[in-house]
Amino acid sequence: MSKDVNNHTTQSNSTPLPTEKRSKVRLIISGGGTGGHIFPAISIANAIKELCPDAEILFVGAEGRMEMQRVPDAGYRIIGLPVAGFDRKHLWKNFSVLLKLIRSQWKARSIIKEFRPQVAVGVGGYASGPTLKTAGMMDIPTLIQEQNSYAGVTNKLLAQKACKICVAYEGMEKFFPAEKIIMTGNPVRQNLLGHSILHADAVKYFGLNPKRKTILILGGSLGARTINQTLTASLDVVRAHPDVQFIWQTGKIYIDQVRETITTATGEVVRNPHISTIPNLYVTDFIKDMANAYAAADLVISRAGAGSISEFCLLQKPVILVPSPNVAEDHQTKNALALADKDAAIYVKDVEAKDKLLPIALETISNPQKLKDLSENIAKLALPNSATVIAKEVLKLITNPNHQLK
Ligand SMILES: CC(=O)N[C@H]1[C@@H](OP(=O)(O)OP(=O)(O)OC[C@H]2O[C@@H](n3ccc(=O)[nH]c3=O)[C@H](O)[C@@H]2O)O[C@H](CO)[C@@H](O)[C@@H]1O
């Protein structure tokens, strides 16, 4: 990157200008890799824009990762770093990763020098490491947002220099300095809340029948192998229940395989990119319009990612959680149990999904009282206005010259 990213005069030294000499609020938001990091970042950006419409926001992500598409889709500018993740199992393979990290730090430095943010926000994921570390070294105040009940490695490292750490779960003092922690909950995209989409219209949007009950099946932002395998092995069950219909998000890497299985099962080639040849089944790799998907759903089946859970709580969705066993410290199981222990969700273990998931889902969807109880119980766990609370903390770091730089 050689040009001043916002057409402002580029300073040659790294000392930030005093706030009063700037025309506008300028901040960097960095992180990504999965929806669980990207969508909270977008909702923080939206909340900052609401409070401060003139604010200039630049995202810094990782080249080739999901944020490079999703952030511009949401109307924000993003620059990619050549950063990649460490291979923790085969340490000798990490030489090129180390070089990429060094190059990313250089690039982050040049981005920061040109854009001259007053604050940098990190949401976890590869890019937030070099960006926030560099911002901290350049004496720019930083705030991090940790979505999970178990802190990621990047956030733990960045915590030492961060001024504030916004969290969604109790007990995060285990990972972060207690005096920096603020309980905010996870930001949820504003367009998912407070809209007036009617259930019937949402169901029709997916080409389905508003008179039938609808189960929304989510595998997190990347898709879930176990959930997909369960469904592909149960297509005959799906076809045997025309009174129930399914919206199934497979994830990008699984979609071709799923379509092939459907083609083999029905003997008809799936032509429309989204609608399968089974009438009560809508299949897609990724749902861009989650507001419609949630509005259509009477019941959700999902992985137990922290961002998804925050959405289910705020939208009061009855949900069956199948936590991924392949995440750090098994944090999705902890996320799921926090709800299941309060009868706010049904918990199905990953290893039991193939046998139990669909029967439990079909039984639950035909039990209105159970759906109502789940909905009422999960609503009690919602932490509203998280994005605005975090946005205010970000802006305070700009306006309050006494912020703590460690
Ligand atoms: C495998 C993995 O590492 N998962 C982690 C990742 O999950 P993942 O990226 O799946 O994130 P979450 O479950 O937290 O959130 C998924 C987000 O993607 C959105 N969405 C999902 C599907 C879709 O088709 N369209 C769409 O927009 C959801 O509405 C939600 O906003 O980050 C979470 C938050 O740090 C962690 O808790 C998860 O453990």
Image: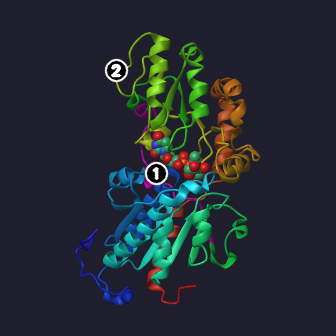
Tell me the residue at 50%/63% (across/down): 98
Between 43 and 227, the residue placed more toward the observer is 227
Between 171 and 54, the residue placed more toward the observer is 171
* 160 over 71 or under it: above or below: below
- Mark 2 or mark 1, earlier in chain: 1
Is residue 229 a member of the stretch shown in magenta? Answer: no
Q: Residue 291 carries which label?
A: none
Residue 155: where, in percent of width, then height? 58, 66
Q: In which quarter of the image is residue 198?
A: top left
> Residue farthest to the top?
267
Residue 184: where, in percent of width, then height? 59, 66
Q: What element carries label 1?
A: loop
Mark 2 residue crowding within 10 angstroms, few (<14) / some (14–19) / many (20+): few
194 with respect to 174 (left or right)? left
Compute the Cα span from label 2 to label 1: 35 Å
Mark 1 residue crowding within 10 angstroms, few (<14) / some (14–19) / many (20+): few
Q: Give the range drawn in magenta.
A: 182-202
Q: In which quarter of the image is residue 22?
A: bottom left
Q: Which mark is residue 194?
A: 1
Q: Looking at the rendering, in which quadrant would you find the C terminus? A: bottom right
Residue 251: where, in percent of width, then height? 48, 37
- At label 2, the amino acid type is Arg
Between 94 and 200, the residue placed more toward the observer is 94
How many marks can you see? 2
Tell me the residue at 48%/89% (across/down): 401
Query: In the rendered image, which residue does mark 2 sit on?
Result: 271
